[in-house]
Amino acid sequence: ADWQTVFDRVDAEEGILAALEAQLETAVRAENFADAAVLTGTIRDMRNADPVTTVERGYTRAVAEEDYVAAAAFRDQGAGLKGWWAGRGATEDESGGSYGVIVQVTAAHGRYVGTSYTARDLALLQETERARQRRQPRKS
């Protein structure tokens, strides 16, 4: 299959998962636990069939079992990418120079997602978090 077909399939699956999770939330609120159990199983099965989940779990298992050949194979498929990465940019918007850039890589259904942040972005996120914490009542 070509990449566009793969991306289209992943997007469709992501939409289905979102709908199933909304149905699950509705079933739980209505205390319809039979439907909730079926929905939970369907969601679990879809997540277990996700290639990113398969790679991440395989990598974790291989490292725990000290099977470093298998761990390297999973690494080459993308495992270990999740987390925060630092880089340099030629300008604030480009790579390769003196401007610091932080990239956060997360796993989403069927793909890894990278989000880059400049120092300005991080400062704004930090200020937004501080404002949110000030609005929350303090627990005693």
Image (spheres, rainbow, N blue to C red):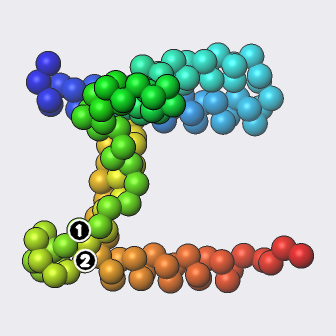
Question: Going 29% across and 76% down the picture, which residue do you hit?
Answer: 118
Kind of residue indicated by mark 1? Gly
Question: Going 14% across and 18% down the picture, which residue do you hit?
Answer: 1
**Which quadrant of the structure image shows residue 131?**
bottom right
Q: Quadrant of the C terminus?
A: bottom right
Residue 42 percent location from the top left of the image: 55, 18
Question: Going 11% across and 24% down the picture, which residue do you hit?
Answer: 2
Residue 92 percent location from the top left of the image: 18, 79
Q: Which residue is mark 1?
A: 87
125 horizontally vs 72: left or right: right
Q: Secondary structure at mark 2?
A: strand
Q: Is residue 96 above or below residue 130?
A: above
Residue 69 is labelled as: none
139 horizontally vs 122: left or right: right
**Which quadrant of the structure image shows residue 91?**
bottom left
Badge 2 or badge 1: first in the primary sequence: 1
Q: Is residue 128 above or below residue 114?
A: below
Q: Is residue 1 above or below residue 77?
A: above
Q: Which residue is mark 2?
A: 100
Question: Are discs 2 and 1 less than 8 Å apart at CB?
Answer: yes
Kind of residue indicated by mark 2? Gly
Nearer to the camera, 18 or 6: 6
Nearer to the camera, 54 or 60: 60
Residue 9 showing in the rendered view:
yes
Residue 116 percent location from the top left of the image: 28, 64
- The local crowd at label 2, few if under 14, some if 14 to 19, many if 20 or more residues have their Cα within 10 Å, is some
Nearer to the camera, 22 or 84: 84
Residue at the right extreme of this rendering? 140
